[in-house]
Image: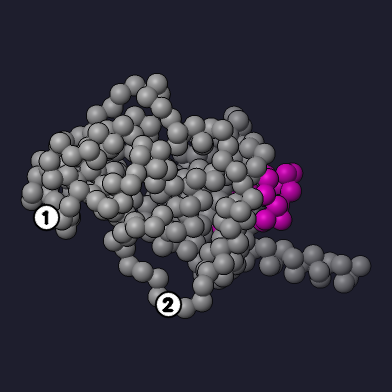
Amino acid sequence: MAGVCSRTRSRKMGAMPSRCLYLLCLFTCKLSPEVAAEVQESSDGPGAREPVRLTDVQATMDFVAAAEVAVIGFFQDLEVPAVSLFHSVVKNFQDVSFGISTASEVLAHYSVTGNTISLFRLVDNKQLDLKSEDIESMDATKLSHFIQSNNLHLVTEYNPMAVIGLFNSMIPIHLLLMMNKASPEYEESLHRYKEAAKLFQGKILFILVDTGVKQNGKVISFFKLKKSQLPALAIYQTLDDVWDTLPITEVSVEHVQNFCDGFLKGKRLRENHESEEKTSKMEL
């Protein structure tokens, strides 16, 4: 989104990452009815929520630190039109913590000079700012779109909206768990996957791909996996499109950790498997 200010370090200049996996989704996937509904949800949606009033710097820092994703409205006063806009989207995001502050010391601490809405992400320690000029041209749908597309968690579910945030993340290595959410093992598997994600925070983005969603078949195909090989882990280096896969019978912290550590050290299970297949064919 044009005009969004990011407070993280920029990538060093060099080769432009192709990120084929996410380009594939951006250019071929349409928003599912469920995702579109989240972005365009009207006032008859979930029950009302109120943002937390943040009156001092320490309380604000603690608020940000305690949330995987936090959105704070920094306003000069509560009478500006942007405040009602901010309140209107709070109810749409049950997995995001919302706060609001007019305290001068808080605004100064976060270098806010005008009305600003900031999104803070724990997973990659990123802060995205919407400045006054950006907010003035926004309505509730556009603000919801901004939040949804940057709503990355320790484990982020793959969908056309999340792709935007994944595409722009500063973390270049992404791990995907491809599993059907309707599976009886799903809840326990997700819990273990989240535990593993904590071990690689800031190094690898953890993503969940629901294989029960028809559109996600493109992701499975990208990694040259068959349905019979699922569930599976796939790890992906966005800078050069290097990737590897690991079909699994169950998700465990140990399996995930070993797979990630191996990839970070340059080991490629897929290459070893392909090499074994070629050797076997030559022997025949």
Image position of 264 (left or right of 93): right
Q: Is residue 190 above or below residue 196?
A: above
Q: Which residue is mark 2?
A: 13
Q: Position of residue 169 (x, y in %)?
A: 43, 58
Amino acid tagged 2: Met
What is the quadrant of residue 94 in the picture?
top left
Q: Position of residue 217 (x, y in %)?
A: 68, 45
Q: Position of residue 24 (x, y in %)?
A: 62, 55
Q: Which residue is mark 1?
A: 108
Task: Work out which residue is located at the far front of the displayed protein and give it.
Answer: 137
- Looking at the rendered structure, the secondary structure element under dot 2 is loop
Image position of 257 (left or right of 249): left
Q: Is residue 225 highlighted in magenta?
A: yes
Residue that appears at 25% across and 33% down: 84
Q: Is residue 277 above or below residue 247?
A: below
Q: Position of residue 225 (x, y in %)?
A: 71, 52
The residue range painted magenta reads: 217-235
Dot 2 or dot 1: first in sequence order is: 2
Q: Is residue 222 highlighted in magenta?
A: yes
- Looking at the rendered structure, the secondary structure element under dot 1 is helix
Amino acid tagged 1: Ala
Viewport quadrant of the C terminus: bottom right
> In the image, which disc is placed on residue 142?
none
Residue that appears at 13% across and 45% down: 76
Residue that appears at 74% across and 48% down: 226
Whether residue 217 is visible to the viewer of this picture, yes or no, is yes
Whether residue 196 is visible to the viewer of this picture, yes or no, is no
Mark 2 crowd level (few <14, some 14–19, many ≥20, 10 Å Cα)? few
> Distance from label 2 to label 1 (Cα)?
31 Å
Image position of 155 (left or right of 74): right
Viewport quadrant of the N terminus: bottom left
Mark 1 crowd level (few <14, some 14–19, many ≥20, 10 Å Cα)? few
